[in-house]
Image (cartoon, helix red, strand yellow):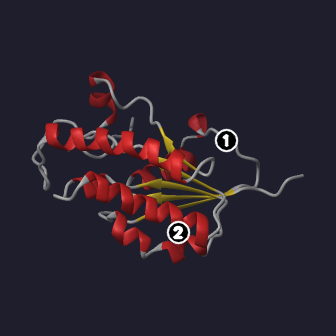
Amino acid sequence: MAAPIKAQLFGHSFVSRLKDFIRHKDELNYRLGLQLGTMVQFNGFPGARATSIIGKMDFVADYSPEILVLLVGTNDLYEDVSVESIEEQICDIVYEALSNIKVAKVIVCQVLHRCEPKIRTRFPVDLHWFNARVDKLNASLDTTLKSRFPNRAFLWRMKGFWSPETKNKNFASDGCHLSDDG
């Protein structure tokens, strides 16, 4: 029998919601195609930027995961830096995981759009500007990960977050974070 896979999810507040989903919703607890005995380690760094995550990679190394799932880039896109530099920082994280930590595969989750907030938010943003940057980053990452890290790093296309109906259902009233349904 093959050794169990170790997987690590590394990102923002989505991690805590996923953790709760897996732990507390028996009727929705999918095995995600993983063998029994698979260790899944959840870690999140609220407010982190790609540049700060590269400095936390020792934390990933402590677990020696075979698969690393990254949820990164949303906070970076708020800043007035180029999408290309954010993409490069994400690729630096992927490179570090694959080359130095010896992770077998890295999955980078697609950055999600923001929605119109229904409440006052601490970090308002021009939605057209922000969502255009999201689209540019996702498209660019898809191409770059395939070319620079063939068969080892992938962009994960997140379903159910793109139509107006699903956005209203899946996002919290701040228009940024996911709701319980999301």
Tags 2 and 1 in contact by the CB under 8 Å rule? no
The percent position of residue 30, horizontal first and vertical second, equals 63, 38
Relative to residue 73, is residue 171 depicted above or below? above
76 w.r.t. 162: above or below: below
Q: Quadrant of residue 64?
A: bottom right
Percent of width and height locating residue 125: 13, 47
Residue 134, compared with residue 162, is above or below; it is below
Q: Nearer the viewer, residue 122 or 74?
A: 74
Q: CA distance from mark 2 to mark 1?
A: 28 Å
Q: Earlier in the sequence, mark 2 or mark 1?
A: 1
Side of 153 relative to 90 (left or right): right
Q: Position of residue 81 (x, y in %)?
A: 20, 59
Residue picked out by circle 2: 96
Left or right of 132 in this view: 25? right
- Residue 175 visible within the image: no
Task: Point out the frontmost of discs 2 and 1.
Answer: 2
Place of residue 57 in the rendered image (x, y in percent of width and height, measured from the top left):
50, 73
Q: At label 1, which amino acid type do we have?
A: Arg
Q: Which mark is residue 121?
A: none
The amino acid type found where label 2 is placed reads Glu
Q: Nearer the viewer, residue 50 or 43?
A: 50
**As drawn, is 166 to the left or to the right of 24?**
left
Instruction: Name the residue beneath numbered marker 1.
Output: 31
Disc 2 crowd, CA 10 A, few/some/many (<14, 14-19, 20+)? some
* Residue 172 appears in the rendering: yes
- Residue displayed at 48% across by 50% down: 108
Secondary element at tag 1: loop
Image point (38%, 59%), residue name: 88
